Amino acid sequence: MLKRSGVGALALLLAHAGPVSAGYGVFAHGYGLKSEGAGGVAVARAEDTPAMAANSAAVLSLGRRFDLGLDWLYVEAGSAIGGNAFGANDAYRSDGQAHFFIPQGGWSTPLGDRAAIGVTVFGAGFGTDYKRSPYARFGGSDRAGIKLMQSVVSTSMAYAVVPGQNVGVGLNLAYQEINAKGLGFLAPVSQSPAQVSDQGSDSEFGYSLQIGWQGRLSEQLDSGIAWRSPTRLGKFRRYRGLLPNGGQLDLPAILGLGLRYQATPVLSFSVDFSRVEFSGQDATGNPASRLAQGRLLGSDGGPGFGWRDQDIYKFGFAWDVRPGLRLRAGYSRSSEIMPPSETFFGMAAPLVMKEHYTLGTTQSLAGGWEITGVSAFVPRSRVAGSGSIPAAFGGGEADIHVQQIITGLSLGKRF
């Protein structure tokens, strides 16, 4: 576990800005506002420093610049319970907080002609806050929810092996915080009943590694490959009765592939593919059905959220309308991470976003400055439960849904 430091203090500040995912699963749909406006594409080519989080090799093409931006996220999430013996059919809204502000930033600089370094900050997480809890009928408190917040300070260094072929490595220093409330009804199925819920915030530090390549395949075609290791963190002792392995909540590895085609001098098309390996971590991948196998919450290999691995396809284009003005648009779609059998716990983490429609623009200003804007719409996605509520809690089904709107502005400068 990493010690608290000045870098950790920066991560702590940014972690409190946005506890709800603005993308797929616990991760954003894109890194940097320019990527966000083009559907999230960034593996093959980066246009601003936050995109180093998608591919550490990107820092070599950015030159000397910095970026500072802010996303505003509106979230409408909720759940419904039907056919349950402990109460009538009812619907619920996660209405404790609906508006979130998510800052981002980065800096890069060359080290001679063939190397460069940079640093950026990216976030991950999710959050629910029910003023009227769907879990109250099972013995939970009237107000309930889970918030997971992670901010990562990501450092990158890249080197041109030969002209047009860049490789990069990065070290990510992570801060993660969790807070669960209103879930005390789960104490009878936990190996540590007093550490299931309502323990306040618990935090840990950790790390992940990333490697990447970006290369020019022809005068018109660029490509990229990137991989981020699982994020390893210390155990959340205050919630060792909720999370498997005595409080472990590592985040998954991510693989990214990308292509960018320069169709004309003013028009380019990009496509990215990402695979997020949620099933590889016990907290995110282990199904709730392990309770029926005698594995208690908090035990080694115990129940988690039961998420599947996620495949994400991103499409984007950029058009230079005139010198100094670039327009972007994009679309992305993902596979569903939450099986219908896992929506009982999924009411606390309704991460069922499937699509993003995006628009963006960048206007160049005097002195190397530029301003970028983005808007994205995440249509309402829903997962209907099937065999989702255990018989011990009265059976029936839990359904979950979510919808989001994202807008943002950033200011960048190339020196």
Image (tube, grey):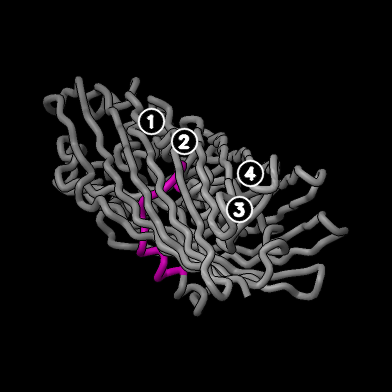
Quote the CA–CA distance across marks 2 and 3. 22 Å
Q: Which residue is mark 3?
A: 54
Q: Is residue 246 left or right of residue 40?
A: left
Q: Are marks 4 and 2 in contact (CB under 8 Å)?
A: no
- Three-letter residue code for mark 2: Trp
The residue at the point 69 percent across, 40 percent down is 263
> Residue 267 — which label?
4
Q: Are marks 1 and 2 in contact (CB under 8 Å)?
A: yes
The residue at the point 32 percent across, 38 percent down is 403
Quote the CA–CA distance across marks 4 and 2. 38 Å
Secondary structure beneath dot 3 equals loop
Q: Nearer the viewer, residue 140 or 151?
A: 151
Secondary structure beneath dot 2 equals loop
- Three-letter residue code for mark 1: Glu
The image quadrant of residue 107 is bottom right
The residue at the point 16 percent across, 47 percent down is 131
Task: Give the mark, 2 or 3, whose residue is nearer the N terminus.
Answer: 3
The residue at the point 74 percent across, 52 percent down is 214
Secondary structure beneath dot 1 equals helix
Classify the position of the N terminus by image quarter: bottom right
Quote the CA–CA distance across marks 3 and 1. 29 Å
The image quadrant of residue 281 is top right
